Image (cartoon, rainbow, N blue to C red):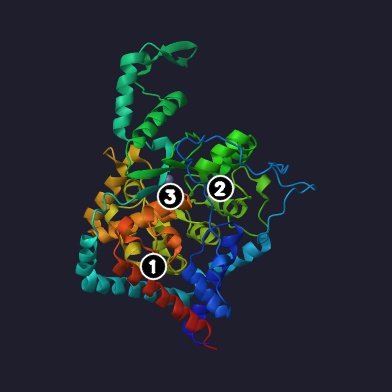
Amino acid sequence: MDDFELSCKGLYRALTIREVRAPLAFQRFPNTPSQFLCKIEGEQWKPEDQVLPVFTPLPKPGEDPFCTKDFPPNLGYVAHAASADKHQPLNHPGPDLVTFIDDMNFLIALIAQGLTKTYTHRHLKFLMSKFNVHEMLNEMEEMKELKKNAHRDFYNSRKVDTHIHAAACMNQKHLLCFIKKSYHVDADRVVHVLKGKEVTMKELFASLNLDGQYFRYMYLKYVFEIQNTILYFVFEILCIFVFSKYIKYFVPVNLFIRVLIYLLTPSSLRFVSLQVTGFDSVDDESKHSGHMFSTKSPKPEEWDIMPFIMCCVFVVSRERGMNTFQFRPHCGEAGAVTHLLACFMTADNISHGLNLKKSPVLQCLYYLAQVPIAMSSLSNNSLFLEYNKNPLLDFHNKGLVISLSTDDPMQFHYTKEPLMEEYAIAAQVFKLSTCDMCEIARNSVLQSGLSAEEKIYFLGLFSNYLKDGPEGNGIRKTNMAQIRMAYRYETLCYELNLIREGVIAD
Ligand SMILES: [Zn+2]
């Protein structure tokens, strides 16, 4: 077997690892790579085999969002905080721990293997050059196509903020207005007890300590303000739930059991099924990343705080009649490269992904499997990586599925529309064209936890938005050029086909 075949076989097995695991957790695996894998295996690809996440559509006007009439019957499931006892209530199909570790060890070996590194490095470089040539030849054509698209531009095509923390979702102006207003109307309120002495807001003001009650107030004000901004939807990570059609929530994995208990009351169940669409890891993935996971690792209940990869293994999936809970962790921001590897096996999509820069093999795999990545370059600029060194443009040009997100507007943004600020700065620094921006905006809607109805409304073409290539692009809604869609599709097919040729060569 020559080098080329060896690399292709490795990449092929890596892709099948994700393909096999995805449907078990009700996560997405795109059609095009799936069709190529079927071809390699000599099987017929059937559209009905694809698994799609289910998100509850918004209540219709006049409908009660908390109505529980059409709920699936109570089947008497019991949630256990520790591992299930001998009355095991439900047996979810899924690869066992030994298979997981086996697959993980294979991927660890693959990303370190010289031959595969060279192969993927070359191909990523090729993808970059190919995109540059595409732009040189077709930039004007793309622009012409978009000019002909009446009543649609970047500003009125839909964008979703795919990663934003509730704790810092307000902008600095919100905070300042809140502080000023509170000081005027409520200065004598006792807000703190210091060594047995009650302290009023006036007295405490110098230190500016905001407590949970104030956070809730500010948060509600924020929700109220975005209700008036129709340009984008916002997705949240944290546990203060407010019912709003503009918000979907992600819950940190460590709060999962609390949410399960919350689920046991019918009206909360309805609420969760409308608003919660996924789980995240802990905010700072670098904190618990040292442990190398193996069969000898301590069991989940023996850890105070589980290491990152372990969290990925034990995230639970969807039961009939409710929302799919997607796993969308912080990954590749500050943690080890192995986190990106674990998420390639387990997550529907990830936030940040900066460290893909360090591993050509993983970068190539994220491209081939079209795993969506929510990137926050302004946040990275403050914390980890200078803006001009951010791999956003590099990833986008190569064809990785990138969306833009704000992370923590309170800390990183200056304007009232942080998501537009994020887009505007990326456009200026990286010289993105309208077509690039619209492509990123379209990716954000696809990546999000919006229901199928909403996606159809924002992307057009009925359920065709699920199709790959120009067929799946409703240009009237997305304002993304069909020439670009065709380029992305053909390039992906070309790369997948190369792998197929390598695998079936002998
Ligand atoms: Zn974050």
- Mark 1: C-beta under 8 Å from nearest atom of ligand 1: no
Task: Identify residue type, mark 1.
Answer: Glu
> Residues under labels 1 and 2: Cα distance?
28 Å
Q: Residue at label 3?
A: 454
Determine which residue is flagged by label 2. 323
Mark 2 and mark 3 lie on one chain; the one further toward the N terminus is 2
Q: Which residue reaches farthest front?
A: 62
Q: Secondary structure at mark 2?
A: loop
The percent position of residue 449, horizontal first and vertical second, equals 47, 49
| Quarter, ligand 1 | top left
For the question of whether residue 333 can be seen, the reply is no
Residue 83 appears at what percent x and percent y? 71, 47
Whether residue 343 is visible:
yes
Q: CA distance from mark 2 to mark 3?
A: 15 Å
* Nearer to the camera, 12 or 223: 223
The disc labelled 2 sits on which kind of residue?
A: Asn
Image-based side of 439 in relation to 8, left or right:
left
- Give coordinates of residue 490: x percent, y percent: 37, 74
- Work out whether mark 3 precedes mark 1 in sequence or the reverse, and give the earlier one: 3
